[in-house]
Amino acid sequence: MELTAVLALPLIGGMVLALVGHRRPAAEINAAFSLLTLFAAAALTARVIAGGPLTAYRQQFFVDSLNVFLVALTAFVGFTTALFSRPYMRVEHDHGKLTALRLRLYHSMFQLFMFTMLLALLTNNMGILWVAMEAATLTTVLLVSLYRTAASLEAAWKYFILCGVGIAQALFGTILLYFAAEKLLGSEGSALLWTHLDTVKAHLEPTVLSLAFVFLLVGYGTKVGLVPLHNWLPDAHAEGPTPVSAVLSGLLLNVALYAVVRCKVLADGALRSALAGQLMMGFGLLSVVVAAFFLSRQKDVKRMFAYSSIEHMGLITFAFGMGEATASFAGLLHMTVHSLTKSAIFFAVGHAAQKAGTQVMDNIRGLIKINPTVGWGLMLGTLAILGMPPFGVFASEFLILTSAMRQQPWATPILLMALGVAFAAVFGKVQPMVFGDTSARRLPHPPAILPVFVHLALVLMLGLWIPPYLAEWYRQAAKFIG
Amino acid sequence: MTAGAAWLPIDAAVALAACWLVLGAAGLFAPRNLAYVGRLLFPLGALVALLLAATGLAALHASPQVMVLALGLPDLPFHLRVDSLSALFLVLLGGAGAGISIYAAGYFRPGEGTAPGLQCLQYHLFLASMAFVMMADDAYFFMVSWETMALSSFFLVTSDHRIPEIRRAGYLYLLIAHIGAIGILLSFGVLQGGSGDYTFAGMRAQPHAGWWASAAFGLALFGFGAKAGLLPLHVWLPEAHPAAPSPVSAMMSGVMLKASIYGLLRVTFDLLQTQLWWWGVIVLALGLLTALFGVIFSAVQTDMKRLLAYSSIENIGLILVAYGLAVTFRGFGMAALAALALTAMLYHCLNHAAFKSLLFLCTGSVLHATRSRSLGRLGGLIHRMPWVAWLALVGVLASAGLPPGNGFVSEWLLLQGFLFTPGLPHGYVNMLVPVAAAAVAMTAALSGYVMVKFFGIVFLGRPREESLVQAHDAGTLERIGLTWLAALCLLLGLAPVAVIGELDRVTRPLVGHGLGEAARAGGWLLLAPIDAARASYSPLLVLAAIAAVFALAVMAVHRLYHRRVRRADPWDCGFPRQTARMQDTAEGFGQPIRQVFEPFFRMERELPSPFDATPRYRVTVADHLWHWLYLPIARAAEFGTRLVAFLQQGRIAVYLLYSFFTLLALLFFIR
Amino acid sequence: MTPATVSIGAQFINLLAAVLLLLSFAMLSQRRILSLIDLFAMQGAVLFVSTLVVAFTTGQVHLYYSATLTLVLKVLLLPWILHRLIRRLNVKWDVETLINIPTTMLVGIVLVIFAFNLALPISELAGTITRSTLGIALATVMLSFLMMITRRKAVPQVIGFLAMENGLFFAATSATYGMPMVVELGIALDVLVGMIILGVFFFQIREQFDSLDIRHLEQLREE
Amino acid sequence: MSATTVILQLLQVVVGLALAPLLAGWVNQCRTWLQNKSAPPLWQPYRQLSKLFHKEVVLAHDASPLFRAVPYILVACMALACAIIPTLSTDLPFAPAADAIALVGIFALARVFIALAGMDIGTAFGSLGSRREMLIGFLAEPALLMVFFTASLISRSTSLATIVETLAHREFAIYPSLAFAGVAFTMVSLAENARVPVDNPATHLELTMIHEAMILEYSGRHLALVEWSAALKLYAYSCLGLALFFPWGIPEGVGLANFAVAVPALLGKLAIGGFLLALIETLSAKMRIFRAPEFLGTAFLLAVLGMLVHFLLEKGI
C-alpha cells in the first residue's frame, strides 16, 4: 500500500541507481523515482486526510497529520530537486568536476537519503528514528564530499564528526527514554513506540525525562543546526553540490526538527513544566540573533544562505518552544514556506554560480542581463526569505511575532532587530548580484527554472491564501504539538 | 458585508484596484511592445484612476462600509473598510494617479532600463497596493499592502539598475522602508493589547492605558515617519526620488508619502482612543525641524529632482506640524481647533499631491528634452518648451505658497490654527507656539526662494548649453497629464470652501468637529473658517482683482500711449560681451543660504587660487546626520558581526568543545 | 535464578563497569595509537562479557545476540579494520594531544564526579540489578567526548567516537537490559557503515593533505 | 455693503495710485534737503513716469512673455494691497477678500514675479539682483507676518479692518508688544522698499544694488509701471505702518464728513512718515549685502519678542 510504496520506492531507486547511475539517463531515472515517490506520498496523504491517523506493521510505523504533511513536503521538494539536478549535474559533469562514477554515487545516495528521511518521518519507533537520522548523516556525508576537493573533504569530515557525536548524545537520550518507559510498558519492543509513549507520557519519570530531553535536544539539535551546535552546517552547505545544499536546508533540518518536536511532546507530558519549551525558545532566539549577525560577513553565496537557514530554523524552534496553537501553527507553516523558498533559492543560486563560474558573491553580477529568469528567481526568492510580503514567509513570521507579542513580549524586539539586521545584510549582497552589468557566460544546457517558480508561486499563494484543508491540517498537527 | 444588490462604493473601489492588478499582469504579455503598453494599458490605468477618484468622492458621502475577502490567514482573512478618511485618500490617489498615469503613457521610451511591460506591472502593482493600504482594516492585510507598496516602488526606483548610485539608493530606500515596517508591526502588536485580535475593529475596542498608548504612538510615528521622510529617517528620500523615473518620483512624492500620513492618522485618531497633548508637541517640533531642514537643503541643491525631493521633505514637515497642532488641541479637548488644524493638514496633503506631482512630471519632460537633471546645464527652456514652462509656473506658485495658488490656502489655515493657540491651558506650549509660527512662516518664505531658483534657472534666462537649442516640448499625452494636474492645483486653490466642505466629512469622525458649516456660512465665495470678523480669505476675489487691474492697466497703457517695441541686445549696465555662463549657477543662487545657514551643512569647498589659469570651483554639501547617526549604527553592527565571527574559527576541537559545554551547561541547568 | 547468582552477577557487573571506566581513562592517557586500538578492543571485550553476564543472570535471550554482535563488531571487526588502516596508511606516529595528559586526567576526574552525581537519582529508580552502572556509562561517554576534543589526529578522534558508542551500548545493556533487537541491529549497522565510510575518508584525506593531522582541516572559517 | 462704501473703496485705490509718486517725490525732496542739496520739484516722479510712458520699449532678444507681463502684475498686486489696507476707512467691502496673512502673500507674489523677471533675460546682474531680493524676502516676510501676528493677537483677528478698529477705537491701552512690532516693522519696510541701509534706490553701483539690478533690462512703459508699483509699495507700507501704529483718524463710518477728516489726516501722517524715512536714510549708511541678513534677523527676532511679550504681559488685556 501507499506507506510501503513511499518507503520502498526510494530504496529500490537507490539500488537501481547504484547499478546504472553512471549511464546517460540516470538523471531521468532519478527524477522518475522521485516522481513515483511523490505520487505515493500524495496517495498516503489523501488516505490520512480521509481516514485519520494510521499505524502499520505491528505499529512500527505511524502516520498522523504532523508527519504526513512533512512526508508530502519531503517528497515534493525531493522531486523538484531531482528535476533541478538533472541539468545542473550534467553541466558539472561536462565541466569535468565529476566523473560518471561520482554521478552514480550521487544519484543512488540521493535516493537513499530520501529513503532515510522518509523512514525517520514515518517510523513509530524512537530507536529507528535515531537509526534513520544517523543513516541520513552517513548518506549526506558522502554527498557533501562528492567533489573530493580539500574544502569538501574538510566540510564532510566536520559534518561527520560533529553530527556523529551529536547523534550519539541523542542515542543516550533515547536509552534514557527507554529506561523510563520500560517500567510502564515492559521491556519488549513496544516501550520505544511513540504512540505508546504518548499514551503514558503523563506517568513517565520527570527526572529521567528531563535528562533524556536534554540529551535528545543536544543530539537532534546539532542536526537542526541550533547555535552553538551549528558549526558543521555552513561548511556542508557551501561545499556540497547545490542540489544537496537544497535538500539539506529544505528537508534534513525539518526532519531533525520534527524529531525534536516529537521528543518535546513527550517531555511536556512528563515534566508538567515548561522546561522543554524554555530550552527550545532559548536555543531558537540565540540561533536567530547569532545567525543574523553572521550573514553580513559572508562572501560565498551558498554559505550565506546556509546561515539564513540557521536563522529560520531558530525562528521555527522558537515558535514550537512557545508551544501554543497559533505558535505551532506558525511553526509548521514556516517549515513549509522555508523549505520551499530556500530550496528555490538554492536552485537559482546553483544556476547563477554555474553561469558565473564561482560562488563568490563579489564575482557574480548582473544575472538579470544574462538570464532574467534566474535573476528574478533569485531576487524574488531572497525577498521572500527575508520576510517580504506578499510571500508566505511573511505570513508565518507575522503569526510567530504576533503570538510572541502575546506570550513573550520581551522576545519580540530582539527577533525583529535580528530580522532587520538579516535584511540589511542579505539584500545588500544579493541586489548587486542580480542587478547591474554582468560578467557571466551562457551555458549549453538550459537551466531548469520551472522548480524555482513553482516553489515561489506556492510560497506566494501561501502568503495570500492558505487552502482551508491545509489550514485544518496544520491545526490538527498544532493541536497535539501542544 | 456586501450583501444585497446595492453596489456600494467599497465594491467599486476593490474592483477598480483589482483592475489595476489585471492591467499590470497584462503588461507581461508583450513586455517590449511600447505601443501596446504605453498607448493602451497606461491610459486604461488612468481611466481606472479617474473612476477610483469618483468612487472615493461617492464614499466620502456614504457611511463606512466593510468587506471581508476570503483571502489571507485562516484566522485573519483580509478585512477591508472604506470610511471617509480612506475615501479622501482614495480621491487623492485617484486624482493624482490619473494625471500621472496618462503622463506615463507618453513618457516611457524604448531601451531605458526595465522592459516597459515589466514597469507597467510594477507601476500598477504600486497603485493597487496603495489603494489597498488605504482600504485595509486589519494588521495583516495592511502590512501586506504596505510592504508590497514598498517593494513595487523599489523595483520602479531601480528600473535603471545599471547605475550603481541608483542601486545604492534603492537599497537604502527598501532598507529604511523595511525597518519602518517593523516599527509599524510592533505598534500594531501594542495596539491589540494582548487580545490577539488583529483586526482594526478589535484594536478600536481595546482600551489603551497611557504608557502603552504612548508606546504605540511612538512606534507608529517611527514607522510611518520612516516612510514619510521625517527627520532623521529622511535620508532615503533625496536618493530615491531622483533615481526613479519621473512619473514614479511623482507618484512616490505626491501619493506614497501621503499613504504614510494616512497610516499615522488612522492609528492616532481612529485606533487609539486617547491622544495626549505632548505627543502633539513632539511631532510639532520634529515637523518644524523637518520642514526647515528640507527647505534649507533644497535651496542649495544643484540637481532639479533632488531639489524637489528636499522640498517634499519640507512639505511633509509642514503637514506634520499641522498634525502635531491637531493632536495637541485634541489632547486638550478643543475639538473645534483640532478640526481646524486637521483640515489644514488634509488640505495640504491634497495640495502637495497636486503640485509636487506636477513639478516632478515637468522635470521628467525637461529630462527627456535635455537629458540632464543638473541645473547647471539648463536654462531658457521657456522658449523651447512653453507648455511645460507655463504649467510648471502654476506648480511653482502653488509650491511657493503664494495667493491665489493652492499652497497658500493650507498655509493660511495652518497659520490661523497657530493664532488660536493662546487658548491653550499650558504655559510652555503657549510660549513655544510663536516660535513655531515664526519657523513656519520662514519655511514658507524660503520655499519661495527655492521655487524662484528652480523655475528661474530651468526655464528662464539663456540656455547654458548649446545642445538645449533643439530641446522639444512635451508630447500630447504628457501635456494632458500636466494640464490635468495644473487644473487640480487651480481648483484646490480657488474653491477652498467646497473642498473644506468635503474635508468636514473626514474631520468629524476623527475629532468630532468640522469646519463645514462655519466655512459655508461665509458664503461660497468667502472662506471664513471661524467667522468673517476674525479672518477671511477669498482667492477668487483676489484673482479677479489682480486680473481686472492687469487687464485695465494693459488696455489703458496701450490705449493712452503706444505699443512700440524694439528688440535689442540686453543692456546689462553696458557690459559689452556677455555669455550664458555669466548667469547665476545653481550653486551661486544657493550661496546666500549656504552662508546664512552654514552650521546646517557639512561642506567641502575647493576654491581656485588667484593664479590659476583654468580656475575651478567645487563645493559639495552633505548631511551631518550621516556622520552623526547612520555611520555609528553601521559601525556597531559591524562590531557585532566581528564578535560572532569569532565563533566560527574552523577548529573542530573547538566546535566539539562548544557542544560539550552546551551539554554540560544544560545538564547543570536542569539539575 | 537464585538471588545469590543475581547478587554475584551484580557484583561482577559492577566490577566490569569499574574496569570499563579504568579503560576509558587509560585511553584518555594513551599516547601510542596501536595500543589505543588495543585498549578499544579490550573495552569491547569487557562490554561483551558484561552483556553475557547480564544475559545469564537475567535470562534475557536477545542479550545473547547482542553479545555476539558486540564480539564480532567491536572486538574483532572494528579493531581489525583500524589495524589495517594504520598499516595501509602506514602511520606509526604517536598521538599528540592539544592539552597535556595530566590536565586531561584532572578534567576527566571532575567529569566522572559530575556524571555520578547526575546519574545518582536516576539509578535509584532503576529496577535492574545493574543500577549503579548507569553513572559509569555516562562517565565513559563523557570521557570519550573529552578524548575526541583533546586529540589532534583523525584516527584517535574516530576511536574516541567508537568508545563513546561503547559507553552508550554499555548504558543500554546495564541500565535497561538492552534496547529492542531491531534498534540494536540498526545501531550496529550504522556504526559499521560509518566505520567503512571513515576508512574511505582517511585515504581521501591522506591523498589531499598527505597527513591525517586535522590541523589541515581548519581552512573553512569566518575570517 | 452700500454703494457709498464701494465708492469709498474705489476712491481709496485711486487716491493710492495718485498719491504714491507724490510720496516718493516728497521723500526724495526731504532727503535732498537733509543733505543740503537743491531738491527736485515735488512732482518730479510724475514727469518721469509720463516721460517713460512715451518712450518706446527696448526689449532684449530673448525676453519671454513673462518678462513683459510682470510690470502689470506688479501694479495689480500693489493696487490690491492699497485696496485692502484701511487708509480712508475701515469699512471696506473688499477687505474680507484678503486679511493680513493674505496681504503678506500678495507682497510675496509681487516679489517672486519681479525676481523671475530679473532672471528672465539671463544677464549676470539680473540673477544677482533676484538672488539678493529673495534673500531679503525670506527674512523680511516672516518678520512682517510676526508683526501682524502681534497685532492680531491683540485684536483676536487677522482682518486688517478689525485690527485697525480695535486699535483705534477701543479704550486706550498701552501695548508694549506693539513697540517691538513697530521697530521690527520699520526695519522690514526699509528693506522691502529698497531703502538705505539695505539698498540704495539712487545708485546703479553694481555690487550694492538689489532692486535696480533686477529691473535693469526694463525700459519705456514697462519701467514706468515698475517704478510706479515701487512707489505704490512704499505708499502701501507707509499706510500700513500708520494704520497699525497710529490708527487715529481713520473713520469707521462712511460719508463725506468722515472723508473730509480722513484725507487730511492721512496726508499729514504721510508727510511726517516720509520725512522720518528720509531722516533715517540720511543718518544711516548703506551696509554690505551680508549684513542685511543680520539686520533683518534682528527685525525678525524683535517681532517674535513682541509676541512673547504679548503672551507675558498682555494676556489679561
Image (cartoon, coloured by chain):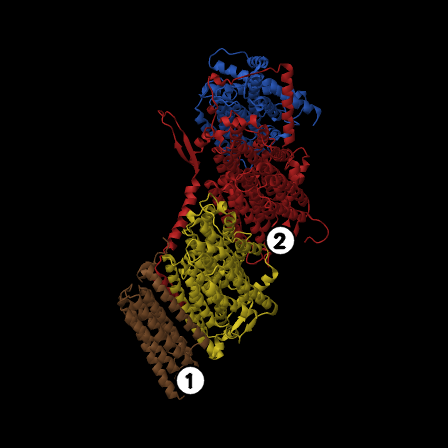
Give the image quarter of residue B72: bottom right
Figure check: A294 above or below D306: below
Q: Distance between the residues labelled 1 and 2?
A: 69 Å
Figure check: B370 above or below B553: below
Along the viewing direction, whichever of A354 and B517 lies nearer the viewer:
A354
- Could you say where residue B267 lies in the image, as x and y percent from the top left? 57, 49
Along the viewing direction, whichever of A20 and B654 lies nearer the viewer:
A20
Q: Colour of chain A?
A: yellow
Which chain's residue wears label 1? C
Residue B229 visible in the shown view? no
- Could you say where residue A161 lies in the image, as x and y percent from the top left? 38, 64
Q: Colour of chain B?
A: red
Residue located farthest toward the front when viewing the structure as drawn: A23
- Tell me the amino acid under the disc marked 1: Gly
Give the image quarter of residue B76: bottom right
- Could you say where residue A434 lies in the image, as x and y percent from the top left? 48, 47
Position of the N terminus of chain B, as image quadrant, is bottom right
Q: Colour of chain C?
A: brown
Mark 1 or 2, which is nearer the eye? 1
Classify 10 Å Cα crowding around label 2: few (below 14), some (14-19), many (20 and above).
many
Q: Chain D is drawn in which colour?
A: blue
Figure check: B171 above or below A11: above
Could you say which disc has been placed on residue D193 in the image? none
Q: Name the residue under label 1.
A: C59
- Tell me the amino acid under the disc marked 2: His
Give the image quarter of residue B60: top right
Q: Mark 2 points at which residue?
A: B79
